[in-house]
Amino acid sequence: MQSIIEIETKVDELVERWTPQRADRLRRRALDPGDFQDLASAGYLTLAVPVDHGGSFSGLSSIGAMTRILAKVATVDPSLALVASMHPTVAIWWALPTDPPSDIASTWRAEIDEVFAAVMSGTWLGTITSEPGTGGDFMKTTTSATHVEGEMYALSGIKHFGSGSGVLDRLITTAVRDGHSVEPFPDIFVIEAADWPSGAVDGMSLIAPWDGVGMKATQSHGASLEGVLARRYSWSGGWAAHIDSIIAASAAVWISIIAAVVDTAMAEAGSRLRGRSDLGTFEAAGWAEAEIDRFLLGAARDSVVNLCEADDPPAAAQAARRAKLGTANLAESCLTTISRVIGGGSLSASSPFASWFEDVRALGFLRPPWGLATDALIEELRTTA
């Protein structure tokens, strides 16, 4: 097993190799499967695998290493970093210690063994759970699941935002089994979708190729499921036992990616502005304002990451709910201001500031998106007041 330091060193080498390509990477609209092979070879996948399964994950305290590595990748390729972050935010559901009901305990443990054996052999995990009209709330899923045999079901419904489609191997999703309700938890299924949509998956059609202006290379395609085969996991409510850890871990990695983009943009802005004697009042004041936003964003990121590393899930989740919304606003404000300071050239498609601006805006739309995240925070305030 590689140590975390060894993995970080190898990722550093990859980032150094990718840095000269940054301008091209910011403009591209498709992921390079070779990048994911390189990250897997560096040992990145094992960061989300528990120690007793051959990896280096030892609980919420392990999130710090993931945030550092993803932040480094984000400095040269935000879309790659975002898609790579999907893997640990899915794997953590199985990686954290659980106490399943006795009637499914042996099945659940066998599923955990299978998942991490696959990851150790190079399998990338991702999600395609969101559905139109749900506001990102998977408790509102209407996708149906009809039993075929064993734990195999035929899923039918519409899904969108399958980030990493075409490079991630297993896509986790939600659906409602015939005769069952979404309450108390929707059922969790996995679709084997390696190479989709370029590689055919029976019953899974591409209906909305990703054409977003932010994180534009993430291949967050939408799909129509028409009887696609998927395997149901035995403990649908397993994630609820660790909801605080899942919220905190997701926020920590996503905020770290956005913070890294902001830091990179500010460094580039500084290289252009520092030492100039002709800065006007507007430019100088704007630069200072952007630096304050960058500082506050970094403090919010550090708060969530530090609470994760302290293995304090409730406090980390509480901080995450605030930091997710706060940093989304700060990042957008910072890049707006610094782009104005740089001037009209920042609007060019060839300018990195144009790409960085749209990329940091993506944070507010990531799970949970603006509306759902705000509702969750308001509900917390009501119940703890």
Image: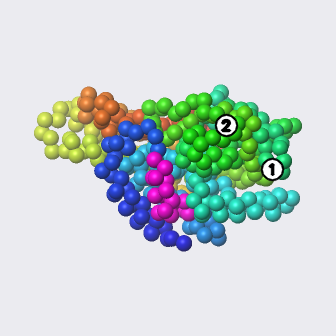
Q: Badge 2 is on which residue?
A: 204
**Which residue in the structure is indicated by mark 1?**
151
Residue 282, position as x, y percentages in the image: 23, 31
The tag earlier along the polypeptide, 1 or 2, is 1
Pick whichever, 199 or 271, lies toward us. Answer: 199
Question: What residue is rendered at 25% in x and 34% in y?
Answer: 342
Colouring: rainbow
Of badges 1 and 2, nearer the viewer stands 2
| The residue stretch that appears in magenta | 32-47
Q: Which mark is on residue 358?
A: none
Horizontal side of residue 149 vs 357, given as left or right = right
In the rendered image, residue 38 lying in the magenta stretch gets the answer yes
Asked whether 365 falls inside the magenta stretch, the response is no
| Nearer the observer, 28 or 360 | 28
Q: Secondary structure at mark 1?
A: loop
What is the three-letter code of the residue carrying label 1?
A: Glu
For residue 97, what is the image quadrant?
bottom right
Q: Residue at x 27, y 45 (%)?
A: 268
In the image, residue 379 above or below residue 344: below
